[in-house]
Amino acid sequence: MTVLIAKDHTFEPVVHRYDWTVDEVQELLERPLMDLLWQAQLVHRTANPGYRVQLASLLSVKTGGCQEDCAYCPQSMHNSSDVEGQPDLVVQIQTVLERARAAKDAGADRFCMGWAWREIRDGAQFEAMLAMVSGVRELGLEACVTAGMLTEKQASRLADAGLTAYNHNLDTSPEYYDQIITTRTYQERIETLQKVRSAGITLCCGGIIGMGESTLDRASLLCVLANINPHPESVPINGLVAVEGTPLQDLPAVDPLEMVRMVATARILMPRSRVRLSAGREQLGREAQILCLQAGADSIFYGDSLLTTSNPDVKTDRELLSQAGVHANWEESDE
């Protein structure tokens, strides 16, 4: 499909591209903010007429004790912040489905489930995961899972269970990656994405800013994402939530306008992907969140918590979206 992109105050037809260079992406990221926002909104209005926002709910099914050493994560066994020992829902299928039903009643139409694993393990726990996916789909919700690396057979079984999407973030650029994670390579992340896509499951893949990376690193991350063909169907943009007990605990909060720039650039690069405002949204404030919605964000995580960090409550989010003049599912369910 062709979309319209503004350049020098004219309109030019531009097709979806998968050959972006890091220099091109960095040029977009560093444009004057008004020009960047204008260009992103033109693309967004074409891709998302009516400004509809998908509401997604996120539940931590297996929390803490992860073997990875991700420097930002309070679920890593390598960090003193490790939250292992919290209630484990891994085999409590009905409990998870009750949470999914409550999320649907609150207006969500996508239910995401997280397992703090380096990789999926076969056995009772994986069978429980499959049952949860099937149950969520029977409720009429999209189902998304994040659980680390997986095999081709596991990906195929998840697809057979009805899984809508698999989340596996790249986190940062290939160049900066070893400053954040050493227990898994960038190539292993790419290979996981390939297995998911080969099984016919959509990709949910994005990254995190505010971890000490440069603008060039952010451009490189977006370049990798934008050159996946087809583009990831879902692209979460996260701002670091600096949690005590992690190596990144002392880093300052992300400048809200940097989040706006990431969202806008992601929208231009990947016109039809869902760009999701994810972790760190609570730190943005109302005005910056509205700018992100204007710039191209068309999904938010909905509910008062993410995996291990807080999130704006449902009432606050309803007020925000109403003030922004965007539409979401609860409006239809309330009619």
Image (tube, rainbow, N blue to C red):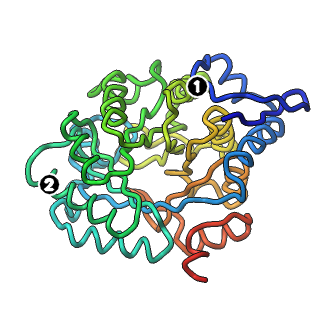
User: Considering only vertical position in the picture, is 318 above or below 216?
Assistant: below
- The residue under the point 52% across, 62% down is 55
Q: Is residue 258 left or right of residue 4?
A: left
- The residue under the point 68% across, 53% down is 293
Q: Position of residue 272 (x, y in %)?
A: 60, 41
Foreground of the two, 173 or 181: 173
Are circles 1 and 2 on residues that touch, CB within 8 Å?
A: no
User: Considering only vertical position in the picture, is 291 above or below 269?
Assistant: below
Q: Position of residue 184 (x, y in %)?
A: 28, 27
Hey, what amino acid is under mark 2? Glu
Determine which residue is flagged by label 1: 214
In terms of image quadrants, where is residue 24?
A: top right
Q: Position of residue 329 (x, y in %)?
A: 56, 69
Outermost residue on the right side: it is 9
The disc at residue 127 is 2
Q: Earlier in the sequence, mark 1 or mark 2?
A: 2
User: Considering only vertical position in the picture, is 94 above or below 133?
Assistant: below
Q: CA distance from mark 1 to mark 2?
A: 42 Å
